[in-house]
Amino acid sequence: MAVTPNFYHSPRGTKYWIPNVPTPLKPATGMVFGRWEDAVTLYQDYAQRAGFDIRLSTVARYKGVITHRYIVCSRFGNPNSNTGDSMDVTPASSKQRNSSFKVTDCQACIKLKPVKGTEGYSIYKFIEPHNHGLVDVDNMDLTRGRRQLTFTEQEFIHKAQTSGFGATVSHRMQASLKGGEHLVRGTKTDHKNFARDIREFIGERDAQMVIDKLNGNMLHLENFYFNHTVVNGELRSLFWVDDICKCNYNAFGDVVAFDATYDTNKYNMIFVPFTGVDNHQKCVTFGAGLLYNETIESFTWLLDSFLKAHVKHPRLVLTDQDAAMKQAVSSVFTESTHRLCMWHVTKKLPAKVCGDKLENTDLRSRIHKLVWNVFIKPSTFESRWKDLMDEFDLGDNNWLNDMFEIRDQWVPAYFRDLPMCCLMKTTSRCESSNSLFKVYSSSGNTLVQFMLCYENTLNAQRFEHRRLQYETTTTSPKMLTSLPIERHASYIYTHNLFKEVQKEIHKGLYSCGLDRVETVDGCRISFVNHHDKSKGLVGEFKVTFTLNDGTIECSCRGFTRIGYLCRHIFCVFRNMNIDVIPDQYVASRWRHDVLPPKIFSIDARYLGGRDEKTIKRQEATTLFNECADRVRGDLENLIDFVEDMRMLKEKIYQAIPEKPAYNSKAVVISDLTGYSEPESVTATAPKGIRNKGCGTSRRLIGPGEKAVERSQKPKRLCRTCFTYTTHDSRNCKAKDPKGKKKAKKSSNSKGKGAQDDA
């Protein structure tokens, strides 16, 4: 509750205010304190009750020994008397800020001197009156002392920033959690200033701090790999992989996709994560790099680093049509097959083919149906493509001819014999991973902040994997049939993959039928008819079972394409009374136990590890919250709990003095980020990076997107070609320009003659 101060006039008419505070709570001359911090605490508590703020002032020394120390009112001192000159032509950057001042030369203070032979201090003078009005107690949260951020608030600001939330949002969140702005230390400006302090602490040492941190990880973390290049003192490239990424790559690294993404850091360095598919059919990261540019040399260095870290080549590498990537993949991944993203190819179709042919015919759907068909052979694709080009008179379309020339790099028919060829046909999973990284990071982040955001993103990805793994091991899926082979599949696969296998088993039971069986050269050949409710008979598939070694193969090549058996084989298994899936047809990458247990340990969840102090501090916070939750419904117990906490606080404050060195800005930020100040700087962050499409604040719109926008405009009837399209008779290509000009001239001459006759 606010207490009104006593207001007086001096004999000379000067106004002064004396705080209305009980005498036992006031400082007094002769008081002795065992430590300097105790004196500061007492005067701070007194100031909070009185309605003013304090600050530390003069420290007088004699021959290096402290003789006097003052704690004064925050409004002590003379205001700056400098006035501005209207004729001053000083640059704006060096002019004084046009702001108000608070100092009034207030003399209220306590003066202390050391007690000889001890570390204590005694008050030898206490000046109580103030020459300014005192702050209402209800507004004390706006004073400078109460706006000082504690470590908890600073940690919250930092954690929010590395999770994709700015300082303003973090202040709003704090106000909501604590019950109002008056309970939050600091204003929005104070929160933004601390976020600025973090960036200033990093400063020009940004790249060096990251290099030192990753080098430290190589020394202290198991199987951590890091590589980088520095040119002329500038960091040019980074690549790093931890042990969990290596374990994931060993299990799921048969197909790898990577793509460059931008706007993840303030230096415009290009972020390149390597993405795959885990046993829950979710995206998994195998490593990541930062590059200076997108040249062949940069991508070659990146892939070389990737290969040094993981040793083995992937079976299939998926990228977009970037020429530099293509050259780098072919030179480094010599044992891998390079595949282009189908989406990046097919999305250009509206821009490369005449709009009338796409909009007024079924050309687009037929092209998509042909190129996305995973069942046909290359010869079938080529013959159907030729028929399609002849039918629509597209033989002279240069882009379609170019895409046909490189058909073996993107059409699924040419990858049908490659294991797991249908695991990824586009880089959409790369786009998904990139968007997730951008949720946590932003274009204004330093490299240190970006690395922290990367760790948060990877931890979120690994938590999702752990959650799905927990569901797989602790729950049982619902069965759709009574077949024993379905239940066997539920024991060996993850839940997400089991749903796909279950669908095949169900279709094999209800949509497939055995037509006939033949035995040829020790092979049992079954012909299976595949039916669909809407389409009827889809086709006939041949399943070959070798009797002596138990191998089985279907003409649809489902196991080769996706790593689990197809419905046609399950139909044959049912006919042969086979109740379990043979081990040779259970791909290890889809098993629920493919990863070692250490992947899911506590240490694996936090990149870079956590120190013991952080763990204990979080444990203390958890214990306090649990106790507060237990007594929240009982007012008497709450009062006792608060009193116990107050006594515990006094006990801790008495036993443990405040150490200013722990609260210095550099130490606090270093503790928060986990990045220490480097002893020397040999590498700085790159400058002057210009990525593709830079130089404009507007997003570049490609011809394909423009064509889509045009196609969405309402159609109108052309009176020349009599089709509903986006043009009219004036610019119809079917109209002869010469005839049009003559007709116009003829009509004009007729009109002129008619006017002469009139």
Image (cartoon, rainbow, N blue to C red):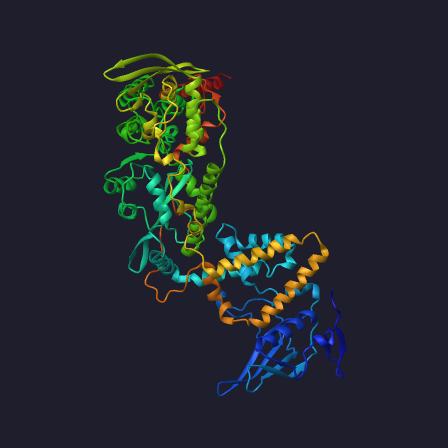
Quadrant hosting residue 236: bottom left
Foreground: 15 or 114? Answer: 114
Quadrant hosting residue 409: top left
| Image quarter of the N terminus | bottom right
Foreground: 217 or 251? Answer: 251
Quadrant hosting residue 748: top left
Foreground: 633 or 713? Answer: 633
The residue lying at 66 percent from left, 78 percent from top is 108
Foreground: 93 or 668? Answer: 668
Residue 53: x %, y % from top left: 64, 71
Q: Quick check: 450 above or below 186?
A: above
Q: Quick check: 358 above or below 468?
A: above
Which residue is farthest top?
Answer: 516
Count up the numbered dots.
0
Residue 212: x %, y % from top left: 36, 60
Residue 215: x %, y % from top left: 34, 58
Question: In the displayed structure, does residue 186 sit left or right of residue 49?
Answer: left
Q: Quick check: 301 above or below 318?
A: below
The residue lying at 58 percent from left, 73 percent from top is 83
Residue 558: x %, y % from top left: 34, 25
Q: Quick check: 494 above or below 723?
A: below
Q: Answer whether residue 482 is visible to the viewer in this image.
A: yes
Q: Answer whether residue 360 is visible to the viewer in this image.
A: no
Question: In the displayed structure, does residue 480 sit left or right of residue 621?
Answer: left
